[in-house]
Image (spheres, helix red, strand yellow):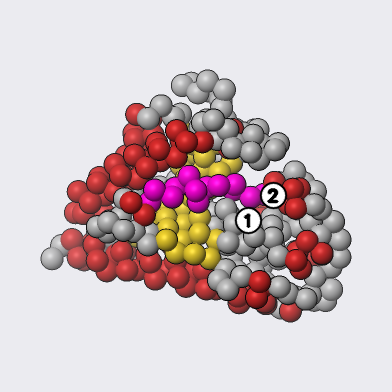
Amino acid sequence: MSNLADLSDPFEVIAPVGPATPLVLSSPHSGSYYPVDLIEASSLSKTALRRSEDCYVDELFSAAKFTGVPMIRALYPRAYLDLNREPYELDPEMFTGPLPDFVNSASPRVAAGLGTIARIVANQKEIYARKLTWAEVETRVNRLYKPYHQTLRRLVNAARDQFGYCVLIDCHSMPSAGLPTGKGIKDSVDVVLGDRNGLSCSSIVTEEAERILGGLGYSTIRNNPYAGGFTTQSYGEPETGIHALQIEINRSLYIDETSLNRRPGFAKLKDDLRVFLETLSAYAGDARKALAYQRLSAE
């Protein structure tokens, strides 16, 4: 049985209070409302389920509303439904009966146990103690996934209609283990910027984001190991004036990765991300000719 009625809305749009900018923020993995049907169907505790959560990312970027940037944030968790996937990337082994032909069961995300409805949490533990039904899939997709992306698309299109272009920042966090090390990186990278190797976002936006973060003291790397997910792939179309950049923040900068409690560096990171948004917004506002839909920029 689904308990989606527990929350009246599956997401929240935080509108800016100041003058608008071409930026839009999406936080698809920071939801922390764990519905009863997930808890009852799972073999894991809520604490264990939270290992897949991008804890507090929406809070880290909460200054967006004061910098002219709207933000859409999920309220339900990634362990319940992953909004940064195709709507139907599913593992047939998780379900009681055959799945429709349109389901993508061959994606690498499904093979890794991290489809639209994930099989495992980040520490490789199985989420479910029973098989799910197709009705449960449809409920989650129809009530959570489709409204989220319909609303995100409206926000992106509204920014492009107003400015001639939009810069969508898809906000995430990443575990510190297994991150690259190397020249200019002390222990591991602080931020990974993903633009699908230049396909989803103009290089000048990625370069400016890298410059701003570097000036704030953060080590950055591009597209390794996170080049971007469904959001950057499906929204990022630089030739039409929509630029999508994924940002992954090292969790060890701001939380204890075991307890998930905030660390002393949380407040500083939050302040720095406000500066990041202010500076990137100003840059994007000045870069209209390079970022706008080409037909518009030729008029």
* Residue underneath mark 1: 32
Distance of mark 2 from mark 1, alpha carbons?
8 Å
Quadrant the C terminus occupies:
bottom left
- Dividing the picture into quarters, in which one does residue 6 lie? bottom right
For the residue pair 117 and 29, the one nearer the viewer reads as 29
Examine the rendered structure and indicate whether residue 63 appears above or below residue 98: above
Task: Give yes or no for contact between labels 2 and 1 (Cβ–Cβ under 8 Å).
Answer: yes
* Residue underneath mark 2: 50
- Residue 224 is at least partly visible in this image: no
Give, as a three-letter code, the residue at label 1: Ser
Residue in view at x 38 percent, y 66 percent: 155
Q: In this view, does 255 lie to the left or right of 35?
A: left
Q: In this view, does 233 lie to the left or right of 282?
A: right
- Residue 186 position in % (x across, y down): 52, 20
Residue in view at x 64 percent, y 34 percent: 256
Category of crowding for the residue at label 2, using alpha-carbon neighbours closer than 10 angstroms: few (below 14), some (14–19), many (at least 20): many
**SS under mark 1:** loop
Examine the rendered structure and indicate whether residue 189 appears above or below residue 37: above
Residue in view at x 63 percent, y 38 percent: 261
Magenta region: which residues?
A: 52-64
- Residue 14 position in % (x across, y down): 42, 61
Residue in view at x 81 percent, y 60 percent: 42
